[in-house]
Image (spheres, helix red, strand yellow):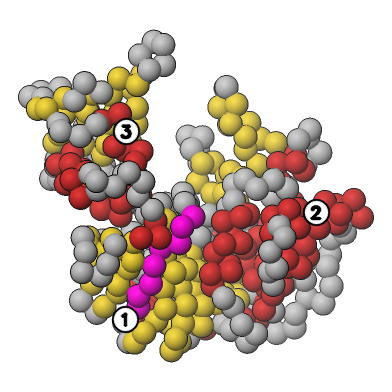
Amino acid sequence: MVLGGEPHRTAYRRSARRVPTRKVTVTDSENARIREFAERLIGADSSAWTATFAQVPRHHFAPSFYAMTGGGWKEVKDGDPGYLDGVYSDAALTTQTDDKGIPNSSSSEPSLMLAMLEALNVRPGDAVFELGTGTGYNAALLCARLGDARVVSVDVDEELVRVARDRLAELGYSPTLAAGDGAAGYPEKAPYDRLIATARLRSVPRAFLEQSADGAVMVVPIGFGVARLSVTGKAEADGHFMPVPAHFMPRRAEGAAPRFAELETQEARPTSVNVAEVLDRLSFPLSLVMPDYTSCTWVDDDGTPSAFGLWTGDGSTATATVTGKVRQTGPRHLWDELEQLAVTFEDIGSVSREDFGIIVTPDGQRVWYGAEDGPSWALTAE
C-alpha cells in the first residue's frame, strides 16, 4: 500500500444510499477456496475475523499481481496457472510497479493484516480511519465487519483510489475514500475510535492524535515493525511494538541518490562490528534510527557478499567491506550510528520487537528498549 505527500486531496464520498447488493458473482468453487483460506489463515484459534475473511474475496481486489522471475517482474493474471494459488496464499502480492519496474503498491501479507486488525480491537459502532487504501481489500474487511458508514480510507494514488472505490462498490461497500496525504488524516469525519496505517511511517502522524477520540487505539507500521498505541490524553499516546515483522511500502518521498562515487576519495577506517551480520541482526532498531535507509550488497563472482552499502534520503552514504573497512560521507555518519547501536545490543543475541515501546507527547516521540528509562531514540516527525 502506498502513501505520499501531495497537498491536494480528492474525496470520493459515500453515497447517501448504500449499494444494496453485490454486482459481482463469486462461484461456489471460489467461495469454497475463500472459506478454506480463512480457516487456514486463522487456524484453530477463535477469531471474530474468521467470517469476515471468509466473506471478502481477495481475488476481486487483485485481478493480477507481479511475481519475481529470473528476468524481473512478471504479471500473473486471473486465469493464469498459479493465479488463485498465489492470491489465496499467505503472501504479500505486488500489485503495481512504477515506470522503472519498481514495486510501489501491494496487497499485504494476510496473516499480518489479521494480526493488525485483531490488535485494532474494533467494536460495533467504532469509526475507523485507514491510511493506505491500496487495492481496497483491507477497507473491504473493515466494511464487512463494521459497516461502510464507519470506514474512511485515504491513499496518495488517485488512480488506486478510483479503482478501489469501484471494486468496493461492486461488492456493495461504499466507504468514504479520498486521494491525498494519509498522514494528514481526514478531519471531515473525525474523531476516530480506531486508526490503522498500511504504509511504513517514520513516526505517528500528528493528525492521528488530533483526530483521535478519547481512548482511541492506533496500529501503525514504524520502521520494520508495527506499534500498537492507546491514546492517553491530548497529543499523548503510548504502547508497544507487536512481535510480527513488517516490511510495508514506505511513504513516497523524494530523496538524494547514494554518493558511492564520492566515497572512493575517502580514506577507509576499520570498524569494530561484524559487517556480515550486523545489518541483519540490527535491521529493526536500525529502521527506527534511520527510517528512510536503504541498503545494498555487492557480491563476488561466486555470489559471496564482499561489501555492503547504506544510505539515507539526505545523501548520507556509507560502505563497509566484509573485511571491516568503512567509508562514509554526508551530513550523517551512518556507520558511526550503526556502531553505537551495535554497542547497545552487543550482549543481546536476538533483538525482539516486543521488547520495544513507544511514547508520544506534545514534545516529541521516542521509542525505548527494555524499559521506559532504558536506551531510547527520538523518532523523525512525519
Q: What residue type is labelled 3?
A: Glu
Instruction: Compare residues 6 and 243 and report the one nearer the observer.
Output: 243
- Residue 32 visible from this viewpoint: yes
Q: What residue type is labelled 1?
A: Glu
Q: Tag 3, which secondary structure? A: helix
Can you tell which of label 2 and label 3 is closer to the viewer? 3
Point out residue 157 in the picture as x, y percentages from the top left corner.
52, 57
Does residue 59 lie above or below 81 as drawn? Answer: below
Residue receiving disc 3: 277
Q: Tag 2, which secondary structure? A: helix
Can you tell which of label 2 and label 1 is closer to the viewer? 2
Residue receiving disc 1: 236
Q: Tell me: 188 left or right of 364.
A: right
**Label disc, if present, on residue 370 of the rendered structure:** none
First along the sequence among labels 3 and 1:
1
Q: What residue type is labelled 2?
A: Glu
2 and 1 marks in contact (CB < 8 Å): no
Q: What stretch is highlighted in magenta?
A: 237-244
Measure how far apart labels 2 and 1 are at the Cα level.
42 Å
Whether residue 78 is in magenta: the answer is: no
Does residue 366 lie above or below 32 as drawn? Answer: below
User: Badge 3: how crowded within 10 Å, few (<14), some, or many (20+)?
Assistant: few
Q: Tag 1, which secondary structure? A: strand
2 and 3 marks in contact (CB < 8 Å): no
Residue receiving disc 2: 36
Q: Which residue is drawn at 47% across and 77% down?
A: 217
First along the sequence among labels 2 and 3:
2
Whether residue 238 is in magenta: the answer is: yes
Does residue 98 lie above or below 145 as drawn? Answer: above
Residue at the outermost top position: 301
